[in-house]
Amino acid sequence: MRLFLDANILFSAAYRDGSPAALLIELSNAGRCQLVSSAFALEEARRNVAAKAAPRVTVLEQLAAQVTIGLEPTRDQLLTAASSPQRMPQFWRQPLPLERRHW
């Protein structure tokens, strides 16, 4: 199973040892899952850790070494997807029912 770690999860895992987010690293080390993130999410986590807990940046870098960084879509790929709704997965094209919207 692959788990995508966004910037918030990366930050939480680096910020405090033993946090629920840090437990995902242990699952990965045990071979139970593969951790994936993006360069964008990792950079955002770096900025936030550096601003709020600078000594923990080294912990974040150690975590990042265990995460596979996926490819970001190019600008052209994003524009193509946005201009061709038929190429998007079906569930993206259907509006969320009003009772399930949270704003």
Image (cartoon, rainbow, N blue to C red):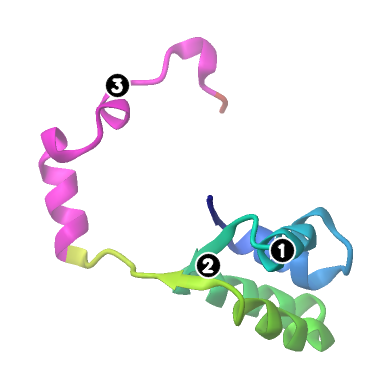
User: Neighbour class for label 3 at 10 Å: few (<14), some, many (≥20)?
Assistant: few
Residue at figure coordinates x 33%, y 21% from the top left: 95
Whole-percent x and y of residue 35?
Answer: 57, 63
Left or right of 53 in this view: 79: left
The residue tagged 2 is 41
Q: Amino acid at mark 3?
A: Gln
The residue tagged 3 is 94
Secondary structure mostly seen in magenta is helix
User: Neighbour class for label 2 at 10 Å: few (<14), some, many (≥20)?
Assistant: some
Q: Which residues are magenta?
A: 76-101
Checking the image for residue 30, the label placed there is 1
Left or right of 7 in this view: 98: left
Q: Is residue 5 visible?
A: no
Whole-percent x and y of residue 92?
Answer: 31, 31
The secondary element bearing badge 3 is classed as loop
Q: Amino acid at mark 1?
A: Ala
- Decide which of tag 3 and tag 2 comes sooner along the chain: 2
Disc 2 from disc 1: Cα separation? 24 Å
Quadrant where the image shows the C terminus: top right
Residue at figure coordinates x 12%, y 52% from the top left: 80
Residue at figure coordinates x 54%, y 77% from the top left: 43
The secondary element bearing badge 1 is classed as loop
Is the residue under label 2 in contact with that under label 3 (CB below 8 Å)? Answer: no
Q: Quadrant of residue 14?
A: bottom right
Disc 3 from disc 1: Cα separation? 38 Å
Residue at figure coordinates x 43%, y 13% from the top left: 97
